[in-house]
Amino acid sequence: MKTIGIIPSRLGSTRFPEKPLAQIAGVSLVERVWRIAAAALSKEHVYVATDSEEISEHVRAFGGQAVMTSVECRNGTERVAEAVKVISEGASSAGDDIGTVINLQGDAPLVPPWVIRELAEFMEREPGVALATPALALSAESILLAEERYEEGEVGGTFVTVSKSGRALYFSKAPIPSLKRFRNSTAVSEGANSRVLARKHIGMYAYRREMLFHLLDLPQTPLEELEQLEQLRALEHDLPISVVDVDYRGRTAHSVDNPGDVSRVEEIIASEGELVLGKENTI
């Protein structure tokens, strides 16, 4: 059974219209994400799922595979699931042996290819795992800093706490666990900082094919609606999520949410170099 990567991509972003086609140092956002995924999984196993003919034509022009999906898809997960159905129902048996589906974020052009590869390899090693996601370990000092920024109105992504067995306990856009009471104490400097208390979630998921469709059949849950985080649906329905610890190896993480993020990503690329030199070769 093979692993495929699917990049959900649509033009109708409220905050950043036509975002997938935005040029970042001369390469479109969607092509950058595709190049990283292709370097990790091989280009034959990567698809862009879109409801836009313009994006579809652009993807095919740079050598990628595009799958047309409905404009009715409410989120990236639904678009990925619909793409899996299209691939499976297409000519030949291209989708007959799909075992694992990796849902890749279309606005994350700085995720290192080795992170995607490590997630795929984890699923290969652990046949009993149906759903997994990567994360970066955080120290207590990092959580304290994130808390201070969060209180000032700066949203810093999503955080996850993990059990001893490596399963997600909870996800939140607020830094967790809260360490406010340690701000004016020596607890952090006296040992807490050396322990991993939480992780920064990387918005990428590996599903067994059956789990992907099972999740979409489940009703939304209260915590999912409160936090606006789809992964909480799985936890509230007692479906375990394995968390895979990964390392960016000194690379900077930054997504493209608004037009202003383009220049920041270009600065990072200019400073740290390209993650992918061509359509298949990594640094």
Image: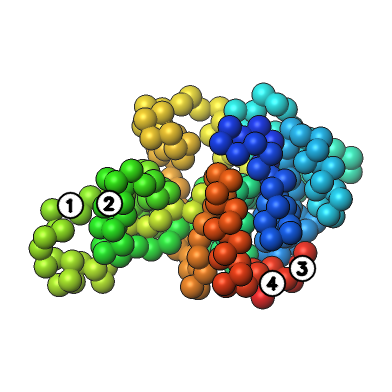
Residue 282's disc is: 4
Q: CA distance from mark 4 to mark 1?
A: 41 Å
Residue 37 is situated, as x and y percent measured from the top left of the image, at 68, 58
Q: What amino acid is labelled 2 in the image?
A: Glu
Q: Earlier in the sequence, mark 4 or mark 1?
A: 1
| For residue 184, side relative to residue 7 (left or right) | left
Q: CA distance from mark 2 to mark 3?
A: 39 Å
**Image point 53% across, 34% down: which residue?**
215
Tell me the SS state at disc 1: helix
Residue tagged 1 = 180
Q: What amino acid is labelled 3 in the image?
A: Gly
Residue 244 is situated, as x and y percent measured from the top left of the image, at 47, 60
Q: Earlier in the sequence, mark 2 or mark 3?
A: 2
Q: Residues within 10 Å of mark 4 (few under 14, many from 20)?
A: some
Residue 147's disc is: 2
**Image point 85% across, 38% down: which residue?**
90
On the question of residue 76 being in view, the answer is no
Q: What amino acid is labelled 4 in the image?
A: Thr
**Between marks 2 and 4 in the image, the one whose residue lies nearer the viewer:** 2
